[in-house]
Amino acid sequence: MNGLKEGWFSELSSLWPGISLSLQVNEVLHSEKSDYQDILVLQTKSHGRALILDGIIQCTESDEFAYQEMISFLPLCSHPSPKKVLIVGGGDGGVAREVAKHPDVESIVQVEIDSHVLDVSKKFLPFMGAGLTNPKLTLHVGDGFRFMAQHRHEFDVIITDSSDPVGPAVCLFQQSYFESMREALKPGGIVCSQAGTVWANIDIVAQTFQHCHQTFRKASFAYAAVPTYPTGQIGFVLGSLSPETNFKEPLRIFSETELDSFNMNYYSAEVHRAAFILPRFARKALDEIVSNVTDEANTGDR
Ligand code: SAM
């Protein structure tokens, strides 16, 4: 089932049982089945173009900036000098577009499993796909899990912009993936991974946070408001090799003029700080994980 019925697309998934976001569709621009997933590009009535993979909304033209800016700038502004960045997934190109804006970033490596997503984004979603042709970017087509295991002490920041934990992305939510990321980082390195929403997937959030907390010296969780994601939110787990990292306080603060010049419309230092303030039920769920870890040296920072 591709979720299309009577001029509407509905996002149906067992990841959020009993609830579904629907977008009114003007035109189906592209539909195919790649080796990895169903790829659908829609011209919606109210949200511009939308990329759907395996029936799940990846991004819409109207609000993708919120997600792309936050998953990129939360870790980049938490690192003292993010020169070399790895992106895993991110086939639409939006994260590459954002990461390239940071003035300290000299090179970006990206590994995306599905070449068809890259082609479709360049052709139908140029507002994001243009990020894939940035001169700072070296693009690989392959499995991010395998790629990670083959790299040691190479990256300052690793951003995992994966689809949800079904299909090819399942491995990117496992403890062993977090351990591989730790090995692929340079000293003081930072990771940031898409981690679901506290309203619909508190179990996925808690499990992903636990992997991160057990693997890194510092771990934290932040979230952003993105209206076309399930429950209107998406979370990020962040981990650091440095015990000095305080994710809540950005090290690099850009002025309003700089943010305007980067064409950034969601992220700011204030939004960065606020993103780590959790509602009580979510804070308690993550606190429980921290209190279960007896090793004092590995205490989380939320
Ligand atoms: N912002 C989106 C979200 O949270 O819904 C994610 C966007 S991006 C399109 C996700 C990408 O991850 C997809 O293009 C998918 O092909 C890629 N992907 C999934 N599993 C992967 C893996 N094991 N290695 C590399 N890329 C992967």
Image: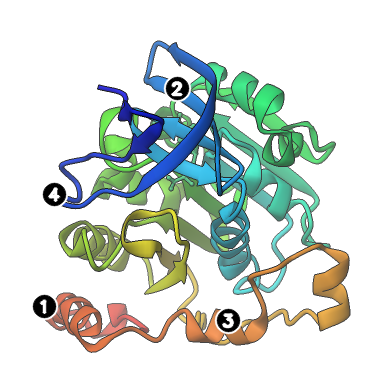
Name, please, the residue furthest toward the front. Answer: 6
| Relative horizontal placement of residue 46, taking residue 168 as reference (left or right) | right
Mark 3 or mark 1, which has the lower sequence index?
A: 3
Residue 157 position by quadrant:
bottom right
State the CA–CA distance, disc 4 to disc 1.
29 Å
State the CA–CA distance, disc 2 to disc 1.
41 Å
Q: Are marks 4 and 1 in contact (CB under 8 Å)?
A: no
**Is any part of residue 227 visible from this angle?**
yes
Q: Is residue 107 above or below residue 111?
A: below
Q: How many numbered marks, from 0 up?
A: 4
User: Residue 73 in the image: x percent, y percent?
Assistant: 63, 66
Q: Is residue 211 above or below residue 45?
A: below
| Relative horizontal placement of residue 225, taking residue 68 as reference (left or right) | left
Viewer-proximal residue among 137 and 52? 52
| Relative horizontal placement of residue 104, taking residue 154 as reference (left or right) | right
State the CA–CA distance, disc 2 to disc 4.
22 Å
The amino acid sitting under disc 1 is Asn
At 78% from the left edge and 31% from the top edge, which residue is drawn? 133
At 47% from the left edge and 16% from the top edge, which residue is drawn? 31
Mark 3 or mark 4, which has the lower sequence index?
A: 4
The amino acid sitting under disc 3 is Val
Q: Is residue 298 above or below residue 27?
A: below
Q: Which residue is mark 1?
A: 292
Of badges 3 and 4, the one in the foreground is 4
State the CA–CA distance, disc 3 to disc 2.
32 Å
Local packing at callout 1 (Cα closer than 10 Å; few below 14, some 14-19, many 20+) is few
Question: Would you say the beta carbon of the disc 3 residue lies within 8 angstroms of ligand 1?
Answer: no
Mark 3 or mark 2, which has the lower sequence index?
A: 2
| Relative horizontal placement of residue 83, taking residue 279 as reference (left or right) | right
Q: Which mark is residue 39?
A: 2
Q: Are marks 3 and 2 in contact (CB under 8 Å)?
A: no
